[in-house]
Amino acid sequence: MTSSTHWVDAGKEGLDYLRRCLAAGKTLSKLIQQRIADVPGIAKALVPATFRINSLHAFEVGGLLPQTGEVAFQAGSDSIAVSKPTLIHPMVQKITQNLRMDMDRICVCEEQMMMPGDPVAKTPTNRLFRYHDELYHVCLGTDSNEKVAETLRKAYSWSRMGVISSRTGIVWRKEGLTDVTRDYLEKLAAAARFVFVGAYDGESFLLWTDEARQDESQR
């Protein structure tokens, strides 16, 4: 599917949508919102080759892909989420490609449903960090595409916010929970290279990069 997708400049409307998503998020989202306000950047939408350009700015509306079936699964302690066809695999390739450019990079995805006390949060195979009652999923450059895809699916958030940044010196546990401070979240936000949020009713993504890194975002 990767060869039949491409990134399209989403313009001012894309930046506005991104800001709305971040404003409704948790601590890291709000810190990144300030980063985006301070640094000139560009938002691009991941769309299929059959995409109609007049639908570009309808970020809340689905229909990019044929919806052949939906699968329900457990999200959090008492919530049910629905899985449907998406452009997650091209997004995963973008994430892993950028993580492997520099092994000090980290991808952090916000979790808006799961709580630290939930049994699923204690699963040993999850790599998470915790800030008070907030949880964030973590991907590293050593992770396979399959592991990154699994993490994106686990990170249940209506905005599907994620950021590629620098580890900024933290020592991660191989698996399980790692506690972090607000200072660490501030460092993550300040070093953000790319920020992504879900778009088109969860079928795809918008990606933000600052203008100084436009060439890198094309790779």
Image (cartoon, rainbow, N blue to C red):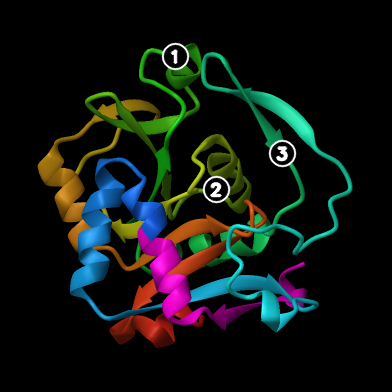
Q: CA distance from mark 3 to mark 1?
A: 21 Å
Q: Quadrant of residue 193?
A: bottom left
Most extreme residue toward the right, as rendered? 68
* In front: label 3 or label 2: 3
Question: Three-letter amino acid code at disc 1?
Answer: Asp
Residue 9 x, y percent position in the rendering: 52, 83
Q: Which residue is mark 1?
A: 118
Tell me whether circle 3 and circle 1 mark residues in contact (CB < 8 Å).
no
Residue 190 x, y percent position in the rendering: 18, 61
Label 1 sits on a secondary structure element that is: loop
Mark 3 vs 1, N-terminal side: 3
Q: Main secondary structure of the magenta part?
A: helix
Q: Within 10 angstroms of label 1, few (less than 14), some, or many (20 or more) residues? A: few
Answer yes or no: is residue 153 visible: yes
Which residues make up the magenta segment?
A: 1-19
In the picture shown, does residue 68 fall above or below 87?
A: above
